[in-house]
Amino acid sequence: MAKKERPRPEKLSVYLYIPNIVGYMRVLLNCVAFAVCFSNKTLFSVLYFFSFCCDAVDGWVARRFNQVSTFGAVLDMVTDRVSTACLLVILSQIYRPSLVFLSLLALDIASHWLQMYSTFLAGKSSHKDVKDSTSWLFRLYYGNRIFMCYCCVSCEVLYIILLLIAKNQSENLLNVVVTTLTQISPLSFLLALTLFGWSMKQTVNVIQMKTAADVCVLYDIEKQQKP
């Protein structure tokens, strides 16, 4: 007896998956957060960080209710990249040299875009599949959720701290960081802790960009060698 085919879900049903609805809420929270980022830094920080935490929630919900979708994964990554990019642009308007934050923005987008594209070329199902990488740090980042979570949280918390401690629109980044670190306080400890995680994340971004670029180049070489 032939097995009955599973009914094909309607497009609307995928858009209305619970984790995707959580994703829409993240977008809305970020819109409200950036609308008040200069007038109410505290509210911005709460909304932005809550939206960031929902990133873990939608992943758990997707697995719990068997509602994992490609659209949800793309929505998740785009929301992450756009929200971080917007915050980096804001920080570039507050601190000098602004090129520091614009460079971080470029590195973040370039490394993730190249990683996604190289994943497609390599025929892998996930951009987190880096078992064949020669970099132990790259494998640790995508292979250990705790380490990955620490690095990602450190980046976002560091950027929020920098926004909160800025007193005017023309702060010197190095002076502010050094002054805060030399003050023995919970804030200085948190800043030091997030700086280390942030540095690990940026190192991974550089490795990711170079590794992904190598995959693209090797793909071109193999393509040229085919008769």
Image (cartoon, grey):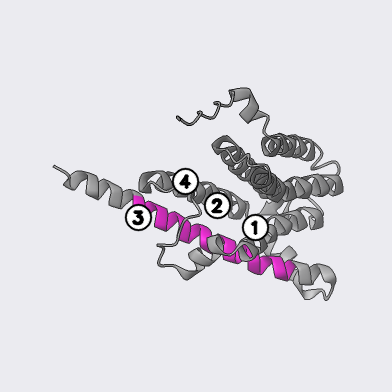
Q: Residue 114: say if magenta.
A: no
- Quarter in which the N terminus is drawn: top left
Labels 4 & 1 near each other (Cβ < 8 A): no
Q: Which dot, 3 or 2, sits closer to the camera?
A: 3
Hey, which quadrant is residue 144 in on the image? bottom right
The secondary structure making up most of the magenta span is helix
Magenta span: 191-215
Q: Could you say which disc has been placed on residue 116 in the image? A: 4
Q: Look at discs 4 and 2 and give the one toward the viewer.
A: 4
Between discs 1 and 2, the one toward the N terminus: 2
Left or right: where does residue 194 sit relative to residue 209?
right
How much space separates mark 3 and mark 4, taking CA atoms?
Answer: 13 Å
Q: Which residue is mark 1?
A: 152
Crowding near the residue tagged with mark 3, few <14, some 14–19, many ≥20 C-alpha atoms within 10 Å: some
Q: Amino acid at mark 1?
A: Cys
Is disc 4 surrounded by few (<14), some (14 to 19) or many (20+) residues within 10 Å? some
Q: Residue 83 bears which disc, if any?
A: none
- At x 63% / y 51%, what residue is drawn? 98
**Total marks drawn?**
4
Looking at the image, is mark 1 or mark 3 earlier in the sequence?
A: 1
Q: Position of residue 97 (x, y in %)?
A: 63, 55
| Residue picked out by circle 2 | 103
Q: Nearer the viewer, mark 3 or mark 4?
A: 4
Spot occupied by residue 170 in the image (x, y as percentages of width and height): 73, 52
Whether residue 169 is visible here, answered yes or no, is: no
Residue linked to disc 3? 214
Specify the quadrant of the image occupied by residue 185: bottom right
Task: Say whether disc 4 or disc 2 marks the residue closer to the N-terminus.
Answer: 2
Looking at numbered disc 3 in the image, what kind of residue is underneath it? Answer: Asp
